[in-house]
């Protein structure tokens, strides 16, 4: 069983390291709200992973793979949310021009942990690809003779791996945030991350199950 957990952790790590919406929203909040909020965002992403993992065990997530209507509804809601937070970041980039140039580096916005957790949770939970990934991956590591606790342990493993990777992004970008929060650089980063999130949203909207 230990070997199974290690193998599953390796697969989860490789999947997490591929940049996606979770990565983008963690980096955005790390630069815009600081380390505490970025860690909260990572926690929200991991909570979404746990939710889809449990849904996969219950067989609910598999409905997205078999129901065109369910998948379409979920992907459009997720796409709209990604576009919403992306456009919000683009607006922030535009509004930060002008007088902000003379104000010097902007500090990270205070607080925002609850809002950041919600950003991470909704970004992950509204992504049907997470559901498809979990429902396709878990059966590869479980079998009829395995203990009942194994699927739940695998869900916990993928949540821990996801949180560790996202938290690492949060700490790295918070560390270099003082440089990136200089007005000109910050506007560029806000615009870039907003564009990335919108592109993820558009890509999700036109994805297939």
Image (tube, rainbow, N blue to C red):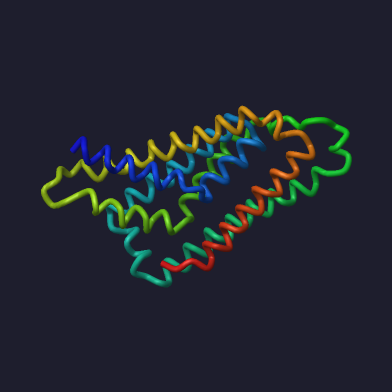
Can you name the residue that lies furthest to the bottom here?
Answer: 68
Please report the residue visible at 65 percent of the width from the left and 36 percent of the height from the top: 31
Q: How many marks?
A: 0
Q: In the figure, residue 129 lies in which quadrant?
A: bottom left
* Quadrant where the image shows the C terminus: bottom left
Residue 94 in the image, given as x and y percentages of width and height? 79, 49
Location of residue 116 (image quadrant) = top right
**Can you say which quadrant of the picture contains the N terminus?**
top left
Judging depth in this view, the residue of 163 and 184 nearest the camera is 184
Residue at the spot x=57%, y=35% of the render? 38
Q: Position of residue 79 (x, y in %)?
A: 55, 60
Q: Residue at x 62, y 53 (%)?
A: 196
**In percent of the image, x 63 and y 31: which residue is there?**
34
Vertical position of residue 162 compared to residue 20: above or below: above
The residue sitting at the left extreme is 145
User: Which x, y percent locates residue 202?
Assistant: 58, 63
Residue 166 locus on image (x, y percent):
49, 38
Residue 109 in the image: above or below residue 18: above
Image-based side of 20 in relation to 138, left or right:
right
Please state which of residues 58 and 139 is positioned toward the viewer in this rendering: 139
Between 134 and 115, the one lying in front of the other is 134
């Amino acid at each position: 069983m230990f070997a199974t957990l290690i193998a599953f952790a390796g697969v989860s790590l490789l999947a997490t390291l591929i940049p996606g919406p979770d990565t983008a929203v963690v980096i955005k909040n790390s630069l815009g709200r600081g380390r505490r909020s970025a860690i909260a965002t990572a926690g929200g992403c991991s909570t979404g992973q746990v939710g889809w993992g449990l849904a996969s065990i219950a067989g609910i997530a598999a409905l997205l793979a078999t129901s065109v209507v369910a998948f379409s509804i979920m992907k459009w809601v997720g796409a709209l949310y990604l576009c919403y937070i992306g456009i919000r970041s683009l607006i922030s980039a535009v509004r930060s021009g002008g007088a902000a140039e003379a104000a010097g580096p902007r500090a990270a916005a205070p607080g925002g942990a609850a809002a950041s957790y919600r950003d991470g949770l909704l970004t992950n939970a509204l992504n049907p690809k997470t559901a498809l990934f979990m429902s396709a991956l878990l059966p590869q590591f479980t079998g009829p003779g395995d203990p009942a606790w194994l699927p739940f342990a695998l869900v916990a493993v993928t949540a821990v791996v996801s949180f560790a990777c996202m938290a690492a992004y949060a700490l790295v970008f918070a560390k270099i945030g003082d440089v990136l929060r200089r007005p000109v650089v910050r506007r560029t980063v806000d615009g870039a991350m907003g564009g990335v999130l919108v592109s993820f949203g558009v890509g999700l909207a036109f994805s297939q199950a």
